[in-house]
Amino acid sequence: MNLLLEPVIEFASSATCVVSIWLNTRRNSIGWPIGLISVTLASWVYLSSGLFAECGLQVFYFLSGIYGWWQWETGKSNEGALLVMKIPVSSLWISLLAGLVGFGLLFGFLTTINRSSQPFLDALITAFSIVAQIWLARRWIENWILWILINLVSICLYVHKELWFFSALYGILLLLAMKGYFDWKKGEKQA
């Protein structure tokens, strides 16, 4: 990728991501299509940075963005408010186990790719971002707790990779995840 163009794309992806997540914290479904733009742009940056799992994650985000948009449009109360709830205990354990298995498989795969620059963190972030994204689409409040942890690890990775806009982005996303958790707790419905 053109070295002059990459920071512009990284910034545009970051800006649309912040808007998308901010709208998600407010339980506004228009955040999903804005997120589709963000992940499309991010995929180019990750690919050129050798973060292949992160690039593949953007494809998942795109597809789950369509699913989440649909889930949120059909998951509203009669008054139009998005209903949110706690994750069922069985879903919590199954999805965390799936995240660990996904991490192991992805880490094993990435270590065989000579160009993968950070296979451990790349696999960890990717596997659990898939879990968190599913939880977000399902409107489970605990998605925000998982996003807080993912954002902390992501900040460390992006600082190391000198992806400054993404580092700042994940700092903002960390704050938004905290906001999302507390805002969603106010509107929770027991599952």
Image (cartoon, rainbow, N blue to C red):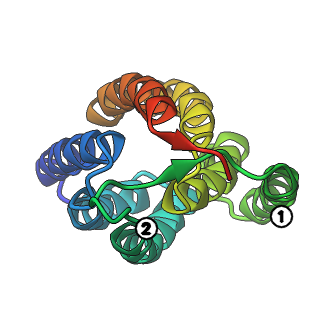
* Residue where numbered disc 1 is placed: 105
Tell me which residue sits at (56%, 62%) in the image: 138
Residue 146 vs residue 13, the one in the foreground: 146
Mark 2–mark 1 Cα distance, whole angstroms, equals: 33 Å
Residue 60 vs residue 123, the one in the foreground: 60
The crowd level at tag 1 (other Cα within 10 Å; few <14, some 14-19, many 20+) is few
Tell me which residue sits at (43%, 67%) in the image: 75
Q: Nearer the viewer, mark 2 or mark 1?
A: 2
Q: Against 30, is 89 above or below?
A: above
Q: Position of residue 177 (x, y in %)?
A: 44, 31
**Does 107 sit left or right of 2 as displayed?**
right
Is residue 175 shown to the viewer in this render?
Answer: yes
Q: Of the residues shown, which amino acid type is indicated by label 1?
A: Leu
Q: Against 141, is 139 above or below?
A: below
The crowd level at tag 2 (other Cα within 10 Å; few <14, some 14-19, many 20+) is some
**Does 122 sit left or right of 36 as displayed?**
right
Look at the numbered disc 2 and give the secondary structure of its residue.
Answer: loop
Q: Of the residues shown, which amino acid type is indicated by label 2?
A: Gly
Q: Against 69, is 186 above or below?
A: above
In the rendered structure, which disc, 2 or 1, sits on the residue that comes first in sequence? 2
* Tag of residue 75: 2
Is residue 162 shown to the viewer in this render?
Answer: no
Q: Position of residue 47 (x, y in %)?
A: 41, 62
